[in-house]
Image (tube, grey):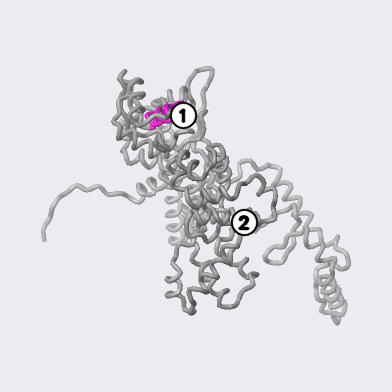
Amino acid sequence: MSMRMDQRQVLTPRMIQSMEILQLPLMALEERIEQELQANPVLELTDNEADPGDRTLAAENAEDYADASSRFSEDERPLVVKEDSNGSDDFNRLEKLADYLDSEEFSTNAGVRDYTRNGAASSSDGDRDKKLDAMNNTASRGGNLSEYLLNQWVFVEAPEPIKQAGEAIINNIDATGYFRTELEQIQQESKTPFSIEQLTEALKLVQTLEPAGIAARTPAECLLLQLDALENGDDEDLAEGHDFPLEKALVRDHLKDLEMNRYPQISKKLGRSIDELKTAVKRLGRLTPHPGKLIGPTDAPPITPDAVVSLNEETGKYEIEMAHDPVPGLSISQMYQKMAKEKGVDKTTREFLANNVRNAKWLLEAIEQRKSTIHRVIRAVVDAQQEFFEKGPEHLKPLPMIGVADQLGIHVATVSRAVSEKWIQTPRGVFPLRRFFSGGRQNAEGEDMSWDAVKEKLKIIIDHEDKKNPLNDDEIVERLSAQGLTLARRTVAKYRKIMNIPTARQRRDF
């Protein structure tokens, strides 16, 4: 046994929760708050915009309901079995009710009434089941590609072995719509014995399904299947204007030449003019290289800005407004706080409530701290990147996170969590907050420029070049140098590839 003294950094549960809340994007924070509301009974949501007269109206409705028995019709009176009778009247009423429930009149009327889980009916404009409404308003889950193809495959007429082979092929089509598995592999792995001839025949049938181009093994085969579908289809409007022999020849024999922009060589081999080739390529551009992506959910995830940056024309300064409050009515129940302090409540209950009240306070403090930290970080970004908002992306300045952390007096990890998956709405559009943090270099005038600004200058130079004689990387380096920015050729080539800008040969316009 021995004793020693050392210094350690220990994160308390409160600190861990604060860091987690800070890093959450806005929608994830709302989900986290909903989970806390379900788990912590002392948390409650109050409707700040509720009409005070609603409580009076509710009281009036309660009084009306108390006197409702006097307004019931003969068939609507509550069922009360009289002890001093033989019950024949009550059974007659039950029989009438059963006949009514089975009638068409009830089925029609039921469409305009909401029935709760306990069977009680409520008016469609009254209180509704919020969970049921949420389920009804939720978009249905989009079917995946395999389900979509199998639903078509059911109606294909073929012998049973071919049908089973087709199902095996469909189950091996990837999300982009390509069939990249070898037939021999399916033959070996399948429990049902298939011959290569059966699998080949099944593949041809699967390739006739919608969308056109499905189950192709190569991009060229995918485009050829789509051209065949257009040529042999019933839609003459879609096929109008297509030069199918030329387009098929380009896809079958000259895809690589098209990629390398070798129009003169293609024109010489096919005996077609360059203008005809360009027109054919333009028509080929209407086809889709990934037909599988046409099926299934395509909804883009929504983006909710955490803050809105706008220019105050009177002061000439940019102001920041936190765009959305995830907890406008989140609070701690006063009743439970009072119960946690009353000595008349048993000890176990008081400890339970005190623990939940403490956790609720931590949550509210973490949310408020998150809001304050993000606001301070955005303020530092706006002050540093004012030229970006005024002049455009090419004036974005390098802004390291450690510099913002030193300026705000917080740890760089806190800045990293504050900008993670956060978005701001600016006069120039909606941007991820992390975009404004990057390294850079100085130009000839000694001004700092971020790498995003350098890439923007590179894009502007290429956009304004002579497409008949495009600039190579060495010439782009010279243009940048003339603007006071010295870069190596390999740096220009690297950023050109990052921006998916092709080489000078591929950008040339004939």
User: Alpha-carbon neighbours of circle 1 within 10 Å: few (<14), some, or many (≥20)?
Assistant: few
Q: Which residue is mark 2?
A: 229
Quadrant of the rendered image containing residue 439 = top left
Extreme residue toward the bottom, this view: 86
Does residue 100 appear in the picture of this structure?
Answer: yes
Q: Position of residue 168 (x, y in %)?
A: 51, 71
User: Alpha-carbon neighbours of circle 2 within 10 Å: few (<14), some, or many (≥20)?
Assistant: some
Q: Amino acid at mark 2?
A: Ala
Secondary element type, mark 2? helix
338 or 18, nearer to the observer: 18
Location of residue 164 with respect to 17 vertically, above or below: below
Residue at 48%, 73% (x, y): give it.
Answer: 196
Extreme residue toward the left, this view: 2
Q: Which residue is mark 1?
A: 468
Magenta region:
452-467
Q: Position of residue 345 (x, y in %)?
A: 48, 59
- Tell me the quadrant of the picture where the N terminus can be found: bottom left
Confirm or deny contact between disc 1 and disc 2 (CB under 8 A): no
Of label 1 and label 2, which has the lower sequence position?
Answer: 2
Q: CA distance from mark 1 to mark 2?
A: 36 Å
Left or right? Give the position of 96 relative to 284: right
Secondary element type, mark 1? loop
113 or 416, nearer to the observer: 416
